Amino acid sequence: MADKQISLPAKLINGGIAGLIGVTCVFPIDLAKTRLQNQQNGSRLYTSMSDCLIKTIRSEGYFGMYRGAAVNLTLVTPEKAIKLAANDFFRHHLSKDGQKLTLLKEMLAGCGAGTCQVIVTTPMEMLKIQLQDAGRVAAQRKLMPEAMSSAPGGPVEVKSPTAMQITRELLRSKGIAGLYKGLGATLLRDVPFSIIYFPLFANLNNLGRHGAEGPAPFYVSFASGCIAGSTAAVAVNPVDVIKTRLQSLTRGSQEDTYTGVTDCIRKILQREGPSAFLKGAYCRALVIAPLFGIAQVVYFLGVGEFILSFLPKRDN
C-alpha cells in the first residue's frame, strides 16, 4: 500500500477524543501534582499524592478532585489536536520519499509540535492552576493561619473564583498577556518534552511492528506512549515546577513570589534545595503516561478516519 497522506481533520478528531478520555481518567492526579508543586517549605499541607487526594475529598468532596477539569476538558481537545497533528505534519514534510526519519529530524518535528501547542497550553494551564490550587490555599488558611497572615493587614481573603471570572479579571487588568503569563516557562517545558517524547515513542512503537509496512498492535502503541510519556514528563519536571510557581496568582504571605524564571530558580535553590524541582514528578509521570498511551491508541486505531468515513465525499 502506498504511503498515505496526512488527513488533518482525522488527526484533529483523534487528538481531541484522546485528550477528553485521558484528562477525565487522570485529572485528580494532576490536581495533586499542582498542589504538591505549589506548597513551599514552612507551609506544607500535604505529604504525598495520596495524602493530598484524601484531604481534598474530606474538605471539598469527591468533585473537589475535579476542580478546574472543565477548563481542561474544553481546551485539551485543541491542545492535543494541535500537538499530534503538528508532529505528524512536520514528520511528513521532513521525510523524503517515505524514508525513515533520522533522529535529528524526529527531534525537529517534536520541537515544532511543542512550539505550536503553547498557543493553547499556556492559557489553559494558567486558568487550571488557579482553580486547582484554590482549595490548597483555602485549606491552608483554615489549618495554618500563620502561613496566610500578612503583617500589615491580617489574614488574606481567599476566594474560589470561576474560570470565567479569572479570565475577565486577567483580561481587564493585564490584557491578553495576562492569560499568557509563564509562556517562556511553558515553552521551556513543552518543547523539550516533545523533542524527547515523539522520537522515543516512534522508535519504541517501531519495535512492535508486524513487518516493515504493518502497523504496531494497539497494546504496543499504548505501552510505547506510556513509557515515552512518563520518561519525558520526569525529564522536564523541574521546568514544570517553575511554570506552576510562576503561573500561581494566589499564595500565602510567607510563600515566595517570583519575577521570572531565573528568579524562581534562584529562590527555590536557596530556600528549598534542588530536591524541590522534583516535587510532583511521580504524579506527573502517572498523569502523562496513560494520557499519551490513550492518545496513541486512539490515534493508531484511526477513530477520526472512521468517523470521517461516514461523511459524504466531495468530487474533485
Image (cartoon, rainbow, N blue to C red):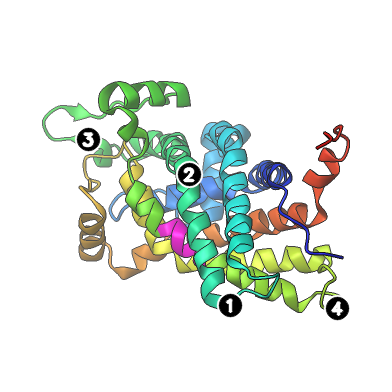
Q: Is residue 173 above or below residue 73?
A: above
Cα gap from disc 4 to disc 1, whole angstroms: 20 Å
Q: Residue 53, percent across and down? A: 56, 46
Mark closer to the observer (2, 3): 2
User: In this view of the protein, which residue sits in the foreground, 269 or 19?
Assistant: 19
The answer to if 192 sits in the magenta stretch is yes
Residue farthest along the left direction in this orientation: 152
Q: What residue is shown with label 3? A: 149
Mark closer to the observer (2, 4): 4
User: In this view of the protein, which residue sits in the foreground, 315 or 27?
Assistant: 315
Chain part drawn in magenta: 189-195
Which numbered disc, 4 or 1, marks the residue that appears first in the sequence? 1
Q: Residue 4, percent across and down? A: 78, 58
Mark closer to the observer (1, 2): 1
User: In this view of the protein, which residue sits in the foreground, 130 or 146?
Assistant: 130
Residue 211's disc number: 4
Q: What residue is shown with label 1? A: 102
Cα gap from disc 4 to disc 3, whole angstroms: 65 Å
Give the residue type at disc 3: Ser
Which numbered disc, 1 or 2, marks the residue that appears first in the sequence? 1
Let me know if residue 232 appears in the view.
yes
Q: What residue is shown with label 2? A: 121
User: In this view of the protein, which residue sits in the foreground, 201 or 168?
Assistant: 201
Let me know if residue 233 appears in the view.
no
Give the residue type at disc 2: Thr
Q: Is residue 312 above or below residue 79?
A: above
Which numbered disc, 2 or 4, marks the residue that appears first in the sequence? 2
* Disc 4, SS: loop
Q: Is residue 23 above or below residue 234?
A: above
Q: Estimate how packed mark 1 is, as few (under 14), some (14 to 19) or many (20 or more) residues with alpha carbons within 10 Å.
A: few
Give the residue type at disc 4: Gly
Question: Which quadrant holds residue 199?
Answer: bottom right
